[in-house]
Image: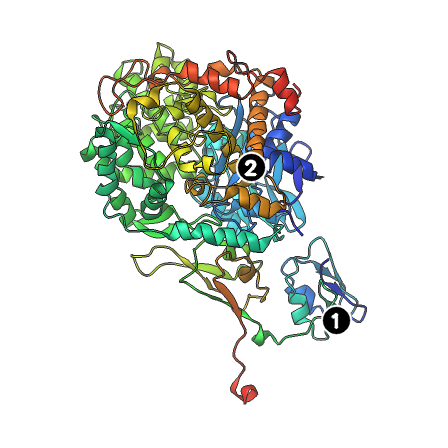
Amino acid sequence: MSYTITEACNGCGACAKICPVNAISGNKKSLHHIDNNTCIDCGVCGRICPNGRIIDENGEPCIMVKRSQWSKPEFNKKTCMSCNICIENCPVSCLALREPLDRKNLHGYPYLKNEKTCIACSFCAEDCPARSIEMIAPVQDKKQAA
Amino acid sequence: MGRGYMGKILNVDLSQGTFLEETIADDVYEKYLSGTGLASRLLYDRIPAGADPLGPDNILAFMSGLLTGSGSLFSGRWMVCGKSPLTGTWGDANCGGTFSPAIKRCGYDGILFSGISEKPVYLYIKNNHIELKDASTIWGMDAVETEEHLEEIHGPHAKAAVIGPAGERLSLISGVCNDKGRIAARSGLGAVMGSKKLKAVVLDGRKRIVPHDKEAMHKLSRKCNFWVQLQPPLGPSFVPAFLGTLLRILPTGMVQDGMIYKMILRQWGTGGMNQMSPEWGDSPIKNWKGSSKDWPMKKSKSADPDVVKNLEFIKYHCYACPLGCGGKCSMAGKYNETHKPEYESVLALGGLCMNEDTDSLFYLNELLNRAGMDTISTGATVAFALECYEQGIITIEDTDGIDLTWGNVNGIIALIYKMIRRDGIGDILADGTKRAAERIGKGAHQYAVHAGGQEPAMHDSRQDPGFGVHYSVDPTPGRHTIGSQLYYEMFQLWKRVKGIPKKLPMCMYTKNSKYKATMGKVKEAAACSKFMNVINGSGMCQFGTFLGITRAPLFDWLNAATGWKKTPNEYMEIGECIQTLKQAFNIKHGIEPKANMLSKRALGIPAQPEGANKGRTVPIEKLAGDYWELFGWDKATGKPTPATLSRFGIQY
């Protein structure tokens, strides 16, 4: 069961614009629809919807998260095996291999190359067999923290 | 909950320009796995008897592995399958890189092409959109240029498998390329793609691949990774080279543990064997007529693993590979980036042709990867031509003035250019040694080393008779990736599979015992064949399985990915079924298995008078007959008996 959009959708189109597999269709200012066969359950529609009109695969309504607060992957180079699974499985191709600087270790390691493209799906962390990736939410700004 | 596989294939009819999605039942995967196993079932049923390999009836299948993307390690291999135009037999080739998960991310375990397109096309899939696009502007480009061009149009997430000019010109030793320097080279399937006017397959899907028990998959992978990362420094490259010398001098052999090879692969890649293998007689020299004496260390130094390694600027890991045996190299003023030449390429274009020029090994490796031509078969065909030239069968008039003296690097390069372009004598040689010998006549066939038309790889059956068995009896003849006595030792299958010979690691044995045709050796060969079918059904890399079955737990990964509860022996039975199906494919297409025996020279008939393999002969007649009988095939003809066919539900 993939994500679904409720009748209360106002058709702002934010979800359709960001969906990495173009699974969402609908006219502006009218109810949008998610194609079950295409949806990959990345959940970005739920995070972006300003009105909380999207229901996740468990039937729970999604809560909008400010984009600046979306979690980002952090990589543990000590346990990473350079297997490329995270890079290849990323639906928005925001990860890349960093070329080694040290000739003693010529294995490349993944890094978040394009932070703006990352949709915080956490597929990279979920799919890493070595548990080398952790999704970390950015630290809130000083005003909010205070 | 998933089962690791996608449960669907896509059929593309290039004559009609139509697509048909097809659901594959769960019990088919249980019987044949995915990859070459599933392809063997589908293509056995669908390619009509006697079909022209370069005609519309042949089907070219691009397959992913059952384990690809499921969380297991070493599972990034994809396979291309079809009727081989080179041998007329079942044909398959496999390759790493990033193309295997791309097939599954489009929602398919395989994509099957039938028919012939009127004009050059390429298949493009993005998410659920499928389209055949015009390829007339990229027809003629080399493989790397084609990939770069397609990446510019479709973005970096799109993964492509392409043919180069060799495939377009229907060279029977051409392959299918991906990741700008990897190639599924064997069986001549690049020519099948060329005959279908299919320039490329471009895949840009994002579907999730879901295993039955992801946590169990990851746990098994972490345990396996422990052994991969266990890497003491091996020292400079003369260490393995002298190990090779030691293995040659000692009167005894030793049951080897694959961890040694894992360490060599991790430090140098397959090139770690560049000097070691010729030393102990594993590498054929001078078109298989030479020996270790003709390629001493001062000559093999031209491919010193440390020299190659020093040009490497980053290790190359295929998808899901923690080992990283590949590498990308740069050479000041020559290449910004080129894939590190593999052992097979180095020896086929080096020792086999007596070529000592280091730069030319890089140059020819890049040239052939771009042309989409098999480096093994190309090197072997050049070596054949060099010997024909030496014997006066080919003259300088035939070669348009090219001097084909052994080791003449300029002559070798010029000849390979001619082969890629099918120009002059290159047209005669572009389809491998068997075809070339038939075209040249004048007794040239005695210098053509092949098995059923396929040039064997750079592993000498006179050093390890196991290679000779598989080169000769496998339904895909001439292949070094099926089994050998060494592979059997490294797979360590006896630790999980019941009823096969046990070996004690590091145990010594007399070298002469390797050449005795015993039932134990036949059982080992059969176990290797069955296991390789499981490996190729899973999309696993053979190098990973060299770690041994307990360290790279293939059977456990398969159970965790699918939710099955099969025993190792049940998986081996699946391998046996696939092997019989491929042999039945050959019989259906009129192949006589006996005709695929490896050329006598490579079997040590007559035995070599000097060198590491002095006096060695492979008792192939006895071993082949016993191997066939063990599979339930006729001992004299190699044809599966009616009882065996019935056991596996195969009908002619």
Residue B368 seen:
yes
From the top left corner, tell me how far across and down residue B276 is, in percent. Answer: 27, 36
Which amino acid does the dot numbered 1 rest on?
Arg
Up-down relation of residue B550 to residue A11 (above or below): above
Q: Quadrant of the N terminus of chain A?
A: bottom right
C-alpha gap between disc 2 and disc 1? 44 Å
Q: Chain of mark 1?
A: A
Up the image or down, A7 lies above or below B619; here it is: below
Q: Mark 1 sits on what residue?
A: A53
Where residue B537 is drawn, which disc sits there?
A: 2
Secondary structure of the residue carrying tag 1 is: loop
Above/below status of B123 relative to B291? below
Residue found at x 73% / y 56%: A36
Q: Quadrant of residue B609?
A: top left
Q: Nearer the viewer, residue B645 or B189?
A: B645
Amino acid on which the number 2 mark rests in the picture: Gly
Q: Residue B217's spot in the image, x, y percent?
A: 55, 51
